[in-house]
Image: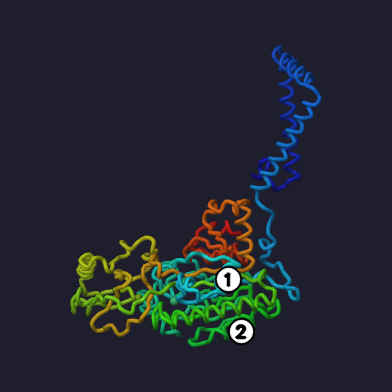
């Protein structure tokens, strides 16, 4: 484009060049025209056209002018309707730009909150009116799809790296790493905080590289990445911290003076997941916790509103996965399939409720693999058996040595165990199953300057969409003005956060879709 007359860059230079070339072209055409004018045909044509226009009545000439002007006006109007609207002020509110809340200056800020185990359809229980109200003021997704396996540690790292498990290395909540000959286990806090486990770049590292102040309130991951970067403020994960204390911490960060205030705040809470595991997704304990989460969201929103920050701070509520009832599962005993000897040959067992199996070197792995595959077929596929080669492509779960060579994946309603392990460890609620299962889906709710722009753009794309809501593809503008976008995979979240902060040029490689969020900006 820069070399053409239409190029926007170097306008003065280009226009003079283009002007010169246009002049010479015009001269050439006039020269050709001169030759034609002297031809007999041209003389006749010119005479006829001359006669025609000069024989038209004056009022007709005026009418033609009005029609032409009317047509031009109509074209300008149509162009205005369908051309890009002028930028919303929120679209340019990024980077070093400041916006006052009336008393203080603020930079664009993102508060990303993960509510562990918040199943997408929990929002339909009538117990979270404030979260729904926030989503009506902002936007929400029908669901957000977790990665496989639908477990806490892999998905929390995906949410802030945009990477599938095979790329970011956290392939389960517990797994054996053949390279370091050591085990990652969620219960070993000291071990899992070590940077060597966590591949990829979390969004807080990207933000730090871009020069932003960041804060992490218990979001799971390393204290420091392997490249030595850490958040400006860090509160390590610990169990049992009440929601109101977390709320106070978030607000105290927001209230810091400009030069100390984080632009990216991550926060994590596990109370809902804990209730789901302990008593199941349909339990009163889950419902009570939902109300507490809703109250937390209400107060957070009210605190931001009181500070006149709802057009400065983007608040995003997400979750890592859903929850399914496992109070009465059908147990599948590995001993019944592999025999007692076969079970003894298992050296490492990863990724509950799936079983990533590593057999001892002396074991006949091929034999046990065939036995498992035959058992899956004989049992009507209550579970599936995969190798790296046969793993469903949509899992993006094969290209890593940390993924055990044989993976047994139960269907919803089934649980894998051995006679030694028994059934006592089975909780009333579980997750980790196929990431297409409805009960495994997570939430996405966003409110702030982002959702204001997204809604404004939605209206400008189809100016008359309020009259033709059926044309509103991808959106569901219902009578109560709730904007619900289609479900999407959580690997897209990383790119949203860096776009909100205006730091795309610092983006790390990730599995998000290029341009995925463009229609909302
Ligand atoms: Zn979780």
Q: In this view of the protein, which residue sits in the foreground, 506 or 60?
A: 60
Seen at 52% across and 82% down, the residue is 292
* SS category of the residue bearing label 1: helix
Q: Position of residue 142 (x, y in %)?
A: 49, 64
Badge 1, how many Cα within 10 Å: few under 14, some, many 20+? few
What secondary structure is found at the residue carrying circle 2?
helix
Quadrant including the C terminus: bottom right
Q: Residue furthest front?
A: 479
Q: What residue is disc 2 on?
A: 248
- Which quarter of the figure has residue 347? bottom left
Tell which quarter ligand 1 is in: bottom left
* In this picture, residue 411 sits left or right of residue 12: left
Q: CA distance from mark 1 to mark 2?
A: 22 Å
- Asked if residue 475 is positioned above or below residue 119 in the image, the reply reads above
Instruction: Please say if the residues under marks 1 and 2 sit with CB atoms less than 8 Å apart.
Output: no
Q: Is residue 215 visible?
A: yes
For this rendering, which residue is in front, 37 or 116?
116
- Relative to residue 456, is residue 435 drawn left or right? left
| Label 1 C-beta lies within 8 Å of the nearest ligand 1 atom | no
Q: Is residue 11 left or right of residue 460?
A: right
- Residue 64 position, x and y percent, is 75, 29
Question: Foreground residue, 179 or 486?
Answer: 486
Residue 145: horizontal and vertical position, in percent?
45, 66
Q: Residue furthest right?
A: 58
Q: Residues within 10 Å of mark 2 (few under 14, many from 20)?
A: few
Q: x, y (%) of residue 332?
A: 25, 75
The image quadrant where one finds the N terminus is: top right
x 75%, y 19%: residue: 52
Q: Please, is residue 415 above or below residue 80 in the view?
A: below
- The tag on residue 204 is none
Circle 1 sits on which residue?
133
């Amino acid at each position: 484009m820069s070399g053409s007359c239409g190029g926007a860059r170097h306008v003065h230079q280009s226009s003079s060049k283009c002007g010169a070339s246009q002049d010479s072209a015009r001269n050439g055409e006039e020269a050709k025209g001169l030759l034609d004018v002297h031809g007999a045909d041209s003389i006749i044509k010119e005479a006829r056209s001359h006669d025609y226009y000069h024989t038209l009545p004056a009022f007709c000439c005026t009418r033609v002018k009005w029609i032409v002007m009317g047509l031009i006006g109509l074209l300008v109007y149509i162009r205005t309707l369908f051309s890009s609207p002028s930028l919303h002020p929120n679209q340019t509110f990024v980077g070093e730009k400041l916006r006052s809340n009336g008393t203080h200056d603020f930079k664009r800020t993102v508060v990303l909150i993960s509510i562990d185990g918040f199943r997408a359809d929990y929002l339909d229980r009538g117990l979270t009116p404030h979260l729904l109200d926030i989503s009506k003021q902002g936007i929400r997704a029908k669901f957000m799809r977790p990665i496989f396996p639908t477990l806490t540690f892999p998905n929390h790292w995906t949410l802030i790296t945009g990477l599938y498990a095979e790329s970011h290395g956290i392939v389960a909540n517990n797994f054996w790493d053949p390279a370091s000959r050591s085990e990652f286990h969620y219960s070993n806090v000291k071990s899992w905080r070590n940077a060597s486990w966590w591949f990829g770049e979390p969004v807080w590292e990207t933000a730090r590289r871009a020069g932003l102040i960041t804060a992490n309130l218990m979001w799971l991951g390393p204290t420091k990445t392997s490249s030595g970067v850490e958040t400006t403020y860090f509160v390590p994960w610990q169990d049992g911290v009440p929601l109101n204390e977390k709320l106070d911490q978030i607000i105290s960060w927001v209230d810091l003076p400009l030069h100390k205030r984080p632009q990216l705040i991550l926060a994590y809470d596990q109370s809902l997941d804990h209730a789901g595991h302990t008593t199941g997704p349909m339990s009163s304990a889950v419902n009570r916790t939902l109300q507490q989460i809703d109250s937390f969201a209400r107060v957070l929103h009210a605190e931001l509103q009181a500070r006149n920050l709802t057009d400065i701070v983007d608040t995003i509520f997400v979750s890592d996965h859903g929850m399914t009832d496992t109070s009465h599962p059908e147990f599948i005993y590995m001993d019944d399939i592999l025999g007692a000897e076969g079970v003894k040959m298992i050296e490492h067992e990863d990724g509950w409720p799936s079983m990533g199996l590593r057999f001892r070197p002396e074991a006949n792995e091929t034999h046990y693999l065939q036995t498992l595959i035959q058992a899956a077929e004989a049992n009507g596929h209550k579970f599936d058996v995969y190798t790296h080669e046969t793993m469903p492509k949509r899992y993006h779960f094969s290209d890593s040595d940390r993924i055990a060579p044989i993976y047994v994946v139960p269907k919803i309603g089934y649980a894998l165990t051995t006679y030694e392990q028994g059934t006592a460890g089975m909780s009333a609620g579980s997750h980790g199953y196929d990431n297409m299962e409805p009960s495994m889906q997570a939430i996405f709710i966003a409110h702030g300057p982002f959702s204001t722009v997204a809604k404004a753009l939605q209206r400008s794309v189809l100016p008359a969409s309020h009259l033709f809501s059926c044309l509103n593809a991808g959106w569901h503008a219902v009578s109560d003005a709730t904007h619900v976008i289609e479900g999407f995979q959580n690997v897209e979240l990383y790119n949203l956060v860096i776009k909100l902060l205006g730091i795309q040029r610092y983006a790390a490689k990730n599995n998000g879709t290029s341009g995925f969020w463009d229609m909302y900006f």
